[in-house]
Image (cartoon, coloured by chain):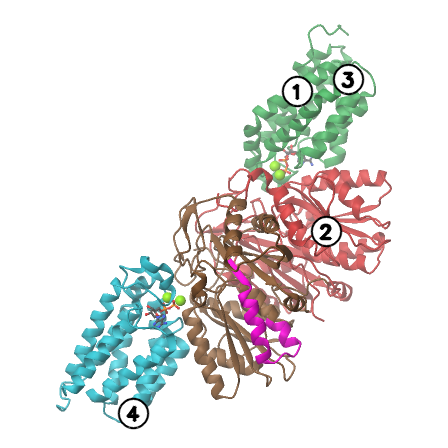
Chain colours: A brown, B cyan, C red, D green
C-alpha cells in the first residue's frame, strides 16, 4: 500500500495534528483534551453551536467544515469508525455558549449510538442538544424506510444551512424544522469505479472487477444496486439523476444545489464532465441549478468514483446558502451575490 | 461469583478476544467493514490496563468502570453496545459482593433491555442480541431451578454460542450488514460470537468451590 | 482505463463545457470563440488583465484560477499540450481593458513558444503583454540554470499576487518587478508514488515499481532525482524541505506560504500528514509558516504523489496574498485577516 | 517547383506523417511525453482539409497559410516550430510562381533562422535543427553548383535524414528530453525525423521535366 504516512496505527492523530498545524492559527482552532476534537475559539455567547463528526479517513469532511458560518466543532473517530461519546461530550462542552448544540452526523449504527449516548450525558450536564442523522443515500433503502439510509455528501449542505442559522442567532428549537426540511430536500447517489485501501490493514475496502462499476455503492463498499459494466459519464449520470429525481420527487420548476463529489481519486476532469451531464439532464426535467460545487468533500481514501447530491431550494434555504461562510477546504465559501 | 472471579473473567475474555481478533474481523468483512475484531480487542486492551486499579472494588463498580472504558476506547457500533452491556450489568448488580444465579439472571436481563433500548434491535435481526437473548432465557430457567452459578453460567454460554452460530441463517436488519439483505444469509454475525466468548469467559472464571445455592 | 468520461478524444471540450455549466453563471464566465477559452465579464476598464493557461488535464489549474482577484482569462490546450497562439490571442483580446495583459504559464517548450508567438501577434494589434514563465521545480535544473526549470504549483501563488496587483490598479510595467520577485521566492519539489493514465491513449504517463517512489519527478513523468524505496512521510518531507531551503536559500527568520499539493489521487489524510512534517522541519530552521494550503491545485490525472511549494513573503507580498479573491476551486480564498 | 507541386508535397508529407504517427510518438515516449506523432498528424490533417482552397494561390501564400493552420491545430512544442518553418519559407519565397534551387536555399535558410529565433536552440541540441541545418548546407552548395531542384532537394532530404539518425548520439538540451541529460543518448529525436520526412516529400513531389537550371 503506497501512501505518504508514518505509522499506520497513528494516522488519525497525525492527520489531525497536521490539520491543526495548517489551519489552527487561521481559523482560531484549538484541540480539546487528548483526543481528536478541534473547535473554534471565537464563537459569540448565546449562540447555538454546530458540531459535526464521524470516522476519520473521509477528509476533507469533517475537519474541513470548521469555520465561521459552518461548523464550530469537529469530532474525529478512528479511520472509518464513530467517535466515542466522551470525545463528543468534550467537543460539545467546549463550544456550548448557552443555547445548546446542534449535532450533524451520518446515519451509521456506530455514529447513531455514540452520539445518542453523548446527548444523554450532555442532558445530565444541562446542555440541550439536537441530533440530526443525515440519510441522503437513496440506494441504501426504499423511500418508505428513509431513516435506514446511509449518510453521504448531504452533510456539506446541511452544515452550511445549520451554520448560517446559528450565525443569525436562531434558537436550537427554531433551527430544527429548517434543517429537517433541508435534510428532506437532499438526495444523493454514488458510483464507484475502484475500491480503496484501509491504512491500518493495507487491505482493500471491497473488490471490484477491472471493467466494472457499481451505482449506489456505500463509502466502505457496502453493496449498492449491483455491479455492471463500465459505461460513459453521460449515460451513468443520466441514470443516477433519473433515480434521484424520482425519489424526492424533484419537479419541473424546482431550483437545486448540485454537488459533484470526488470519492478520493477522481479527477476534476471527470467531475466537470459529470457536472456537464447533470446540468443537461436536469434541464430536460425543467429543474434549474442555482449553484454547483465540484471537488473532493467526502471521500474514502483513494477510492475512484463520483457522488452526486441534489438539494431542493426554497427562498429561506437559498438565503441561508448565501450567508457568509469560510472554511479551510472550501466548504461552500461565501457565494458571490 | 465475587470481585476476584469477575476480574479473572475480564482478563480471560480480553485474552480470548485478542486471539480471535482476525477471525472476528473476517466475519465482519463478509457483511460489514472488517474492523469488528480489531475494535473489540482495542477495547479490552484498555480494560486490561485498568484492571489492577479495580481489584479492591465490588463487582458493581468494576462492571460500571469496565463499561466506561469500553465506551471511550472500542469504537465502531460494538463500542457503545458492549459499554451498555457492562454498565447495565453493573447497575443491576448494585453493591452486593457476591453474584449468584438469580442476581446474574436479573443482571443479564437488564443488559439485554439496555442494548435493545440503545440500538432498537430485536432478536432475529442478526445482531449480538441473538446470542444474549438465549443466554438470558437459559439463566432465568436455571435461577428458578436453583442451579449453582458455575453450571448455570456454562449453560447460558452454550446457549449464546448456539445462538451465535444460528445467526448465519438470519437476514441482517441492523448495522452495515442490513444493506446486503438476503445476501447476508450464510454469514454468522461477529457481534453474536463476541458475546458468546464473553459469557464463556465469565463461566470459566467461576471457581468450583462456590457454595452450593 | 476506468474513467467517468465519454469520448476520450473530446475530454478537453467536455470538461471545459462542464466547468462553464458549473461556474459560468456564478463567476460571470463566458466562452470566447470556438476553442476552450474562458474569460471573466466584469473586468473594470483601464486595469491590467491577468491571463493564465496551458495543457488541460491538470485541473483545477488553469480554469479553477478564474475569479475576482485571481485570473481574468484561462486558455486551455489539449490534454498535456500547450494552447495554440490564436486561442491565447483570442483570450487576451477579450479581457484587455487598455492596460495590457500579464500572462502566467509553466516553463515548458510548447507553452513558451506558443505564448511568445501570441505576444508578438498581440503587439502587432497594439496590446502590450508581459510573459511570466514559471520555473519553480528545483529538481529539473541546477540553480545556475533556473530558466530551464519546469513550472509546477507556484502558478497558484503567482496568479494570486498578479491578480491582487491588477485589482489595486497597478500598471503592467509596475507589476513586473513584484511578480518576478515573487517567482524568485518560490521553490517546489514533488514526490510521485504512482503514474497516471492519458485519457486519449489509455497508456500510463510513466512506469514506477510497486514499492518505489521518485522525488523530483515531473508532472508527466519527466525523470527527477531517481527512483528509491518507499519511505515514511516524515523522512520524505524532511529531505524535500532540506533541498528547497538550501536552494533559495530560505533563512531563519523568513516567513513563508506553504502549499501541499495533491497530484491527483493523494488523500487529504496524506496531505495533512505531510503538512505536519513540513511545519516541524521548517520550525527547526526557524522559518515560520504564515499560511498553509493543502489540496489538489495542479494535478496530473489520477497520479498519486505530493508536491510542496514554499514562497518567501515580504510585507508587500503578504498584503497582496491577503487581498480579497474568490475562485471556483478554492484558489487562496480571501484569507481571514 | 510550382504551386501544384507544392500542393502535392503537402499532401504527400501529410500521408507519410500519418503512417509514421505511432513510430514518431514512440520516439517521443522515450525522452518526452509520447505525443509527437499524434500532434504532427493532427496538424497535417487540418492542412489537408484546407489544401483544395489553396490550389489557386502562389507558393508563398500557400506556405504562409499552411503555417497558420499548423499553428492553431498541431499543439505541443512541434506546433509553433513547424508553423514558423512553413511561414518563414512562405515569406522568403515572396510572390514568385516558380521555386528553383537558389530560391529554395534562401527559403530554407530563412526557416532555419526563424526556428532558431523562436526556440533558442542551436545545432547539436538534439532537436529538429539537427536535420534542417545539414539540409540547408547541402542545398546552398547545390545552388552554387546550379544543380536542378529535384536532385538538390533529394540530396538535402538525405542530409536531413542522416542528421536525424545522428541525433541518437547527442545529449538533448531542449524540450522535455533535456531533463534526461546523458540518459537521452541512444534515442533519436522525433522532431528531426519529422523534418526529414517533410523534406523528402518535397523532393519526391518535384516532377522530372523541371527545366534544367
Ligand atoms: N442496532 C444494533 N443492536 C445490537 N447490535 C448491533 C446493532 N448494530 C450493530 N450491532 C452489532 O455490532 C456488530 C458490528 O460491530 P462493528 O464492526 O464494530 O460495527 P461497525 O464497524 O459497522 O461500526 C454487529 O456484528 C452486530 O452484532
Ligand atoms: N527549442 C526548440 N527548438 C527546436 N526544436 C525543438 C525545441 N524544443 C523542442 N523541439 C522539437 O520538438 C519535438 C517535440 O515535440 P512535441 O512532442 O510536440 O513537444 P512536447 O510534447 O514536449 O510539447 C522535439 O523532438 C524537438 O525536435
Ligand atoms: Mg466500522
Ligand atoms: Mg465493522
Ligand atoms: Mg506534449
Ligand atoms: Mg511530446
Q: Residue A108 appears in which quarter of the rendering?
A: bottom left
Q: Estimate the x, y position of residue C239 in percent, counting from the top left.
A: 55, 59
Measured in 3D between alpha carbons, the distance from the residue under mark 1 to the one under mark 4, in whole angstroms, is 97 Å
Regarding mark 2 in the picture, which secondary structure is present there? Answer: strand
* Image quarter of the C terminus of chain A: bottom right
On screen, residue A299 above or below D59: below
- Is A176 included in the stretch rendered in magenta? yes
Dot 1 corresponds to which residue? D11
* Mark 2 closeness class: few <14, some 14–19, many ≥20 residues within 10 Å: many
Dot 2 corresponds to which residue? C29
Dot 4 corresponds to which residue? B58
Secondary structure mostly seen in the magenta stretch:
helix
Measured in 3D between alpha carbons, the distance from the residue under mark 4 to the one under mark 3, in whole angstroms, is 107 Å
Q: Which residue is drawn at 75% across and 64% down?
A: C323
- In the image, C173 versus C170, the foreground residue is C170
Indicate which label's residue lies in the foreground, 3 or 1: 3
Q: Do the residues at discs 4 and 3 belong to one chain? A: no
Numbered disc 1: what chain?
D
Judge left or right: residue C79 versus residue B210.
right
Indicate which label's residue lies in the foreground, 4 or 3: 3
Regarding mark 1 in the picture, which secondary structure is present there? Answer: helix
Q: Residue A10 appears in which quarter of the rendering?
A: bottom left
Residue found at the far front of this picture: A252
Q: Do the residues at discs 4 and 2 belong to one chain? A: no
Measured in 3D between alpha carbons, the distance from the residue under mark 2 to the one under mark 1, in whole angstroms, is 40 Å
Measured in 3D between alpha carbons, the distance from the residue under mark 3 to the one under mark 2, in whole angstroms, is 42 Å
- Ligand 4 is found in the corner quadrant, namely bottom left
Q: Does the residue labelled 1 lie within 8 Å of ligand 2?
A: no
Q: Give the extent of the magenta segment.
A: A162-188
Amino acid at each position: 500500500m503506497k501512501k505518504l504516512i508514518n505509522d499506520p496505527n497513528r494516522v488519525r492523530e497525525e492527520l489531525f495534528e497536521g490539520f491543526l498545524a495548517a489551519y489552527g492559527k487561521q481559523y482560531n482552532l484549538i484541540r480539546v483534551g487528548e483526543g481528536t476534537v478541534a473547535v473554534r475559539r471565537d464563537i459569540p455567547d448565546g449562540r447555538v453551536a454546530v458540531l459535526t463528526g464521524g470516522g476519520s479517513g473521509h477528509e476533507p469532511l469533517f475537519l474541513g467544515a470548521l469555520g465561521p458560518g459552518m461548523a464550530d466543532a469537529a469530532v474525529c473517530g478512528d479511520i472509518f469508525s464513530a467517535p466515542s461519546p466522551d470525545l463528543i461530550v468534550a467537543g460539545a462542552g467546549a463550544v456550548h455558549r448557552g443555547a445548546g448544540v446542534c449535532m450533524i452526523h451520518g446515519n451509521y449504527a456506530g455514529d447513531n449510538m455514540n452520539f445518542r449516548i453523548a446527548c444523554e450525558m450532555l442532558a445530565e450536564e444541562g446542555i440541550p442538544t439536537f441530533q440530526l442523522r443525515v440519510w441522503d443515500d437513496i440506494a441504501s433503502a426504499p423511500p418508505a424506510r428513509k431513516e435506514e439510509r446511509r449518510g453521504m455528501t448531504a452533510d456539506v449542505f446541511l452544515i452550511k444551512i445549520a451554520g448560517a442559522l446559528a450565525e443569525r442567532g436562531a434558537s436550537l428549537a427554531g433551527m430544527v424544522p429548517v434543517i429537517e426540511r433541508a435534510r428532506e430536500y437532499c438526495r444523493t447517489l454514488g458510483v464507484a469505479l475502484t475500491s480503496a485501501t484501509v491504512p491500518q490493514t493495507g487491505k482493500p475496502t471491497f473488490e471490484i472487477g477491472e471493467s466494472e462499476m457499481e451505482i449506489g455503492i456505500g463509502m466502505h463498499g457496502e453493496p449498492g444496486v449491483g455491479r455492471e459494466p463500465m459505461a460513459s459519464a453521460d449515460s451513468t449520470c443520466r441514470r443516477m439523476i433519473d433515480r434521484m429525481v424520482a425519489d424526492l420527487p424533484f419537479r419541473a420548476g424546482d431550483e437545486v444545489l448540485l454537488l459533484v463529489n470526488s470519492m478520493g481519486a477522481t479527477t476534476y476532469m471527470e467531475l466537470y464532465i459529470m457536472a456537464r451531464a447533470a446540468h443537461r439532464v436536469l434541464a430536460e426535467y425543467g429543474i434549474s441549478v442555482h449553484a454547483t460545487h465540484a471537488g473532493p468533500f467526502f471521500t474514502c481514501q483513494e477510492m475512484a468514483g463520483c457522488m452526486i447530491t441534489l438539494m431542493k431550494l426554497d427562498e429561506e434555504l437559498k438565503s441561508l446558502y448565501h450567508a457568509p461562510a469560510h472554511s479551510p477546504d472550501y466548504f461552500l465559501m461565501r457565494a458571490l451575490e | 461469583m465475587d470481585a476476584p472471579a469477575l476480574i479473572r473473567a475480564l482478563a480471560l475474555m480480553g485474552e480470548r478476544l485478542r486471539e480471535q481478533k482476525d477471525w472476528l474481523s473476517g466475519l465482519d468483512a463478509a457483511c460489514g467493514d472488517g474492523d469488528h475484531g480489531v475494535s473489540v480487542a482495542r477495547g479490552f486492551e484498555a480494560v486490561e490496563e485498568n484492571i489492577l486499579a479495580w481489584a479492591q472494588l465490588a463487582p458493581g463498580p468494576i462492571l460500571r468502570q469496565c463499561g466506561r472504558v469500553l465506551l471511550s476506547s472500542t469504537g465502531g457500533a460494538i463500542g457503545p453496545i458492549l459499554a451498555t452491556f457492562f454498565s447495565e450489568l453493573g447497575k443491576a448488580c448494585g453493591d452486593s459482593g457476591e453474584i449468584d444465579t438469580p442476581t446474574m439472571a436479573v443482571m443479564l436481563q437488564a443488559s439485554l433491555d439496555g442494548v435493545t433500548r440503545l440500538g432498537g434491535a430485536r432478536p432475529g435481526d442478526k445482531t449480538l442480541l441473538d446470542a444474549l437473548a438465549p443466554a438470558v432465557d437459559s439463566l432465568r430457567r436455571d435461577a428458578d431451578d436453583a442451579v449453582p452459578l458455575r453450571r448455570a453460567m456454562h449453560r447460558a454460554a452454550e446457549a449464546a454460542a448456539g445462538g451465535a452460530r444460528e445467526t448465519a441463517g438470519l437476514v441482517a436488519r441492523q448495522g452495515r450488514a442490513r444493506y446486503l439483505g438476503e445476501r447476508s444469509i450464510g454469514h454468522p454475525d461477529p457481534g453474536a460470537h463476541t458475546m458468546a466468548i464473553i459469557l464463556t469467559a465469565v463461566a470459566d472464571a467461576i471457581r468450583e468451590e462456590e457454595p452450593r445455592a
